[in-house]
Amino acid sequence: MMRRLISAAVIALCLLPFIWIVYAAAGGHLGPDPAEALMHATGEWSLRLLALCLLVSPLRAWTGWSAVMKQRRTLGLFAYFYGCIHFVSFLQFYIGWDAARLGEELAERPYITLGFIAWILMLPLAVTSTRRMQRRLRGNWARLHRLVYPAAVFACLHLLWQARSDVGEALFYLAVFAVLLAWRIRRHRLKSGSAPAVQT
């Protein structure tokens, strides 16, 4: 019962930014450039939820609270959800769903290329997030879901490249993901070092 309540609370909290965005858009409260405000908000929430998703494993290791692992898939899916809104907003408001223009933007603007790569890398993670796919892919599932690390890096570089003079926010996210990735590398090395030697 408690796990269900926690899961419901996490879903509700993840939906709150979307509800606010819809309310603000409907009421004309997104400022003088609604398209830019929409893209900025959805992109930022995608990064935030991706960071929270990667924080789950360290949090379990630090607190011993195993129930938090149940929320990792929810956080990851909502990170991709906001990333999709971010991308769709770009298609709608900036290129008008013109495939040729999208190709030009990808070729001429590196920050758009980086964001698109991040979105593409997260696509298979969302598609294979179910338990059924986890059972089907077996060991390959964990290897596939390591794509979340380059996806996070590309997303941060996407933000950094377009930040122009104000790079503080992008550097903050880069630092957060660097710490989370460094924690995983250190844990992997400790596990490898503590493994018993194989007799040959």
Image (cartoon, grey):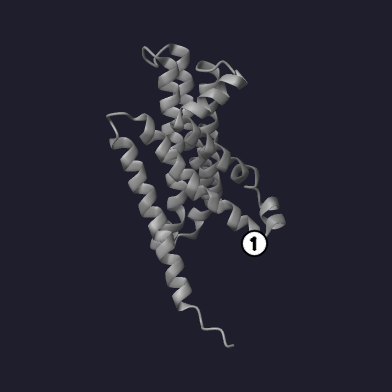
Q: Of all residues shown, which one is farthest toward the bottom?
A: 199
Answer above or below: position of 31 versus 142.
above
Q: Secondary structure at mark 1?
A: helix
Residue 157, by quadrant, is top left
Residue 20 as seen in the image, left or right of residue 81: left
Q: Which x, y percent locates residue 39?
A: 45, 25
- Residue at the location (48% across, 73% down)? 192
Answer above or below: position of 10 versus 84.
below
Residue 111, by quadrant, is top left
- Residue at the location (45% across, 78% down)? 194
Residue 126 as seen in the image, left or right of residue 173: right
Q: Which residue is mark 1?
A: 139
Q: Quadrant of the C terminus?
A: bottom right
Q: Nearer the viewer, residue 168 or 48?
A: 168
Answer above or below: position of 196 versus 118.
below
Crowding at dot 1, Cα within 10 Å, few <14 / some 14-19 / many 20+, comes out as few
Q: Which x, y percent locates residue 144?
A: 60, 53
Q: Which x, y percent locates residue 16?
A: 46, 31
